Image (tube, rainbow, N blue to C red):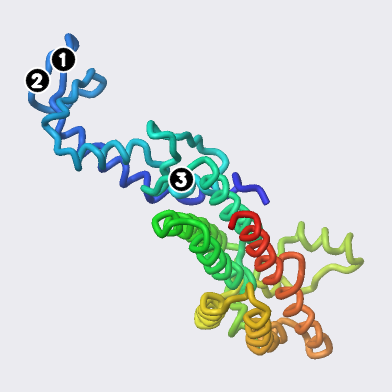
Amino acid sequence: MSMNTINSLQPDKSVDYQNRLQMAFRERIPSADETGTTQTGTLIAGSPVKVDISALGAEELEKARQSWDNHAVSALYRTDIPISKNTDGVYRIGKASFTEEEYHAARDLVTGMAGLLKQGALGYRDHTRMALAESLVEKCASSVFSDEQSRVIVKAMQDFNDRLNSHNNELLSKSYYVENDIEPSKEYWGLKQVISEEAKNAMASLFGRKPSGIAAVTSIATNRALIESLQTKANETDVMSREGMDEFAAFYRSVMKPVYSTQYPADMRSDSGASVEQDLYGDEGVVKMADFAQKWLRQNQ
């Protein structure tokens, strides 16, 4: 998956904080004229500035220095923003310090897990995997990193998921999604996608017949209670253990098989079981995520 695709979906939350802190710091600094002579008053845009360090407390100065050196947590999953070590020779991310080795290990964890997630309109499987990603990243990070570093790593995974949710919501606001009024699927799959004539013609060329309807039921998750139930189970179950995986799989089957069944005509209901097993054991399934987490731990512990 391309990490750059999602980079512009939502601004970094920590950037605004850094700007405010630097502005507050500058308000404490006397401005200078073009000769470099300091004068009290409003900071003149573009003018050179001399900092009287004695005018600042040591704690304030350290906070300001760390803010300038600090990178947003998105540095752990974005490839399009430059990141470098600070004056102390460490990577400062989310106010936590990482050595070269720690930075690359943390980045491999977050980007590796993010690479298993889907960008676009989200189904129940996707919301489940996003919650599992946060849970697995937290388990891995807490086993290898300090509490401060772990907090930043988990925040980076949450930040990535927030962007996926924002992108999903943006897509669903488009006019080609309409309310699904078909029973019983509308309880879980509450949106239909309008099929354009161009898409109908493409389907006709591929499958030999043109769809008769003007809209098709989507695989987009719309039942908030079900999403929260799946996420809760994902957060409280250790899928890295055999017992935990078996427990989660049994729960997922019991919940999702009837949900998938509402998508199929009566003579195709057996396909719902196949969809569930694909979610669990397929190329982008739960087991794949647990395997990645276990491999990362073996390499970094």
The reply, left or right, for residue 265 in relation to residue 146 is right
* Residue at image location 62% in from the left, 78% down from the top: 189
Q: Who's the residue at 71% across and 81% down the image?
A: 263
Q: Which mark is residue 94?
A: none
User: Which of the two residues, 210 or 72, is positioned nearer the viewer here?
Assistant: 72
Residue at screen point 70% across, 72% down? 216
Residue 77 in percent (x, y) is at 55, 49
Q: Quadrant of residue 208?
A: bottom right
Q: Which residue is mark 1?
A: 33
Local secondary structure at mark 1 = loop
In this rendering, which labeled residue sits more in front, label 3 or label 2?
A: 3
Residue that mark 2 sits on: 39
- The local crowd at label 3, few if under 14, some if 14 to 19, many if 20 or more residues have their Cα within 10 Å, is many
Kind of residue at badge 1: Asp
Residue where numbered disc 3 is placed: 98
Q: Is residue 98 above or below residue 84?
A: below
Dot 2 and dot 1 residues touching (CB under 8 Å): yes
- Compute the Cα span from label 1 to label 3: 39 Å
Residue closest to the far right: 208
How far from the left and from the top, in percent, is residue 244? 62, 81
Residue 242 seen in render: yes
